[in-house]
Image (tube, rainbow, N blue to C red):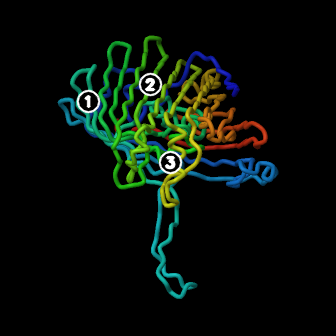
Amino acid sequence: MKRIKIVFLAAFSGICCMASAQDEAEKKHEVLPRFSGLTLGGYAEAAYTRNFYSDSPFRYMQPASHKNDPSHGRFDLPHIVFFVGYDFGKGWRINSEIEFEHGGTESAMEVEAEEGGEYEQEIERGGEVVLEQFWIEKTITQALNIRAGHIIVPIGLTNGNHLPTQFFTVYRPEGENTIFPCTWHETGISVWGRIAAWRYEAMLLPGLDSELFGSEKWIGNASASPYEFRIANKYAGAFRLDNYSVRGLRMGISAYYGESFRNSLMPSYAEKFNHISGAVSIGSFDFEYRGSAVVARGYFDYGHLGDSKSIYIYNRSLPNQSPSPRTAIASDALAAGVEAGYDIFTHVPSLKKQNQKMYLFGRCEYYDSMYKTAKDVQDEKWCGRQRFVAGLNYFPINDIVVKAEYAAGLLDAPFNNEPSVSIGIAYAGFFTR
């Protein structure tokens, strides 16, 4: 039986975290977000990591052969995001975000002298350019708002709190960033509102594509369509409920359900597959507590995939040109984690007066994208791990943070542990007020 070793750090307090790009005012517990005409903002991260383990693609297949491989370092620009919002009045507003992941992409046409003067198209930089949000919203009352367009799916902690000032680690929390899409954004329609100390959101969106499920990420890659459009042969629903009854504390539950099989470009409608639906079910609990000196956050996510063995067998039969990884798929995946930080500048009056903060933090989590498997489906043991992180977050102002951390990824034998050191700098803020 797998044991989950999670140490929950208790704390009472926190920082005034930067509001999310999707709704700043909601993070401040106001009834409705307020815009004054045009709103411009964004967030960005730059990071460096030294990994003290092998970067060989065969390190999990032949762990003994890569135990003493040299360390490797990486500079990265994980996310650079610009967003624009506008309040048209009479309850109508829009919001849009464009994201450059890992520096964006570059390609160029060149004439290669060493190849006889031939023209050649070359990829010069990896990365992605993504439209993360674009929606139009109508506010009817504080209890009823209708939003349509490209929307963040409100499942788990990180999807709704993905700004770099809303988590302590240099990179987004690894567990949720593994087992399902993060940041998860889909084109759909949602209804949300605030009633007393409760906030709700319900969303209708396209189903996931089971051909993109795999061992390492479970359903994590299945929302990003490799085509120029999002296939919607199947549909799904997401729901979230948050409570703010206790001062400084937010507790939330969220759930997702939708079928995934035959939600691909060229699905097979052979009668022998009629019994397969590939229903994906996710349940999640998360919390955040913020006060004057300490902040604590945590989450627990559990997901189940119906017909996982049948989908695995079907995916293995797909042609090599298919975008499917064609790997084993778990019936169940799990991720749980908690982090807490204490502002040591609370005890330095001159720095506290300047609103500077220095958080000493710790984080621990466990995740497994192959937590349970159907009979005769191979369980890739390296997909499950514990991760412990300790470090510092320095906020010279509320909108900028400098981060440093040591992380230890602990895997079961015979796989090698994965320690690393990372530093980063980030901002998240509005350019207009």
Q: Would residue 66 be found to the left or right of residue 19 on screen?
A: right
* Mark 1 vs mark 2, CA separation in Å: 19 Å
Q: Would residue 34 be found to the left or right of residue 404 on screen?
A: left
The image shows a total of numbered marks equal to: 3
- Asked if disc 2 and disc 3 are in contact, CB closer than 8 Å, the reply is no
- Residue 332 x %, y %: 56, 32
Q: Nearer the viewer, residue 293 or 317?
A: 317
User: Reading the chain from its start, which is encountered first: label 1 or label 2?
Assistant: 1
State whether residue 431 appears in this view.
no
User: Reading the chain from its start, which is encountered first: label 3 or label 1?
Assistant: 1
Task: Check disc 3 and report the residue beneath it.
Answer: 314
Q: Nearer the viewer, residue 348 or 390?
A: 390
State whether residue 373 appears in this view.
yes
- Residue 48 x %, y %: 63, 49
Q: Nearer the viewer, mark 2 or mark 3?
A: 3
Other residues around mark 3 within 10 Å, as few (<14) / some (14–19) / many (≥20) = some
- Asked if disc 3 and disc 1 are in contact, CB closer than 8 Å, the reply is no
- Residue 290 x %, y %: 52, 20
Q: Amino acid at mark 2?
A: Ser
Instruction: Name the residue: 29% across, 35% down.
Output: 189
> Which label sits on residue 254?
2
State which quarter of the image contains the N terminus: top right
* Mark 2 vs mark 3, CA separation in Å: 30 Å
User: Reading the chain from its start, which is encountered first: label 2 or label 3?
Assistant: 2
Task: Check disc 1 and report the residue beneath it.
Answer: 146
Q: Quadrant of residue 340?
A: top right
Q: Quadrant of residue 19?
A: top left
Q: Secondary structure at mark 1?
A: strand
Q: Nearer the viewer, mark 1 or mark 2?
A: 2
